[in-house]
Amino acid sequence: MSHVDTRLTLVRQLHEVTHLQIAAARTLQYQELEELNARYSDLVFQLRVAMQGDLPQDQEQLDLLRDATLELGKSQERLAFLSGSVVSILNRVLPGSSGSPGTYGRNGQLMAG
């Protein structure tokens, strides 16, 4: 295998940030979560730019990219589920909480309800 494709590096970085987002959401570290959300958005932008180029011709690189992307998707689903659960719990326990809860979109940003 020659060099690691930039897209693979970015997907792996997104996966790492997603795991950090999950940890921050579990411990209700909202400031850290905001910083991680900004970092995640920056990486998504970089990946969108990188995806404008041709895909690698090396099948091994393509397989690694596909597998890393699938793992990232699973982590994003866990983050979305956890975030929804936390919001649901907070809405039940906080007095005077009403309205629709915020949830996380596919790009990791908190969306207003």
Image (tube, rainbow, N blue to C red):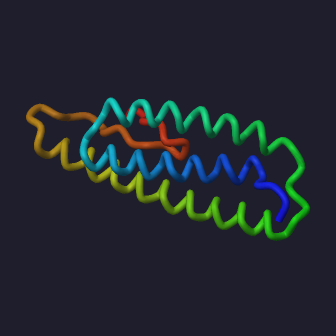
Viewport quadrant of the C terminus? top left
Residue 68 falls in image quadrant: bottom right
Question: In the image, residue 17 lies at what x, y percent?
Answer: 49, 46
Q: Going by the image, does 90 lie left or right of 53? A: left
Q: Total marks drawn? A: 0
Seen as rendered, the residue at the extreme front is 2
Residue 102 falls in image quadrant: top left
Viewer-side residue, 80 vs 24 = 24
Relative to 74, residue 42 above or below: above
Question: In the image, residue 84 lies at what x, y percent?
Answer: 33, 50
Seen as rendered, the residue at the extreme left is 95
Relative to 29, residue 20 above or below: below
Please tell me which residue is depicted at 70% across the width and 54% down the height of the picture.
Answer: 8
Viewport quadrant of the N terminus? bottom right
Please tell me which residue is depicted at 41% across the width and 47% down the height of the picture.
Answer: 20
Question: In the image, residue 77 lies at what x, y percent?
Answer: 47, 58
Question: In the image, residue 16 lies at what x, y percent?
Answer: 51, 51
Q: Going by the image, does 68 lie left or right of 19? A: right
Please tell me which residue is depicted at 76% across the width and 55% down the height of the picture.
Answer: 4
Viewer-side residue, 5 vs 105 = 5
Please tell me which residue is depicted at 87% across the width and 65% down the height of the picture.
Answer: 58
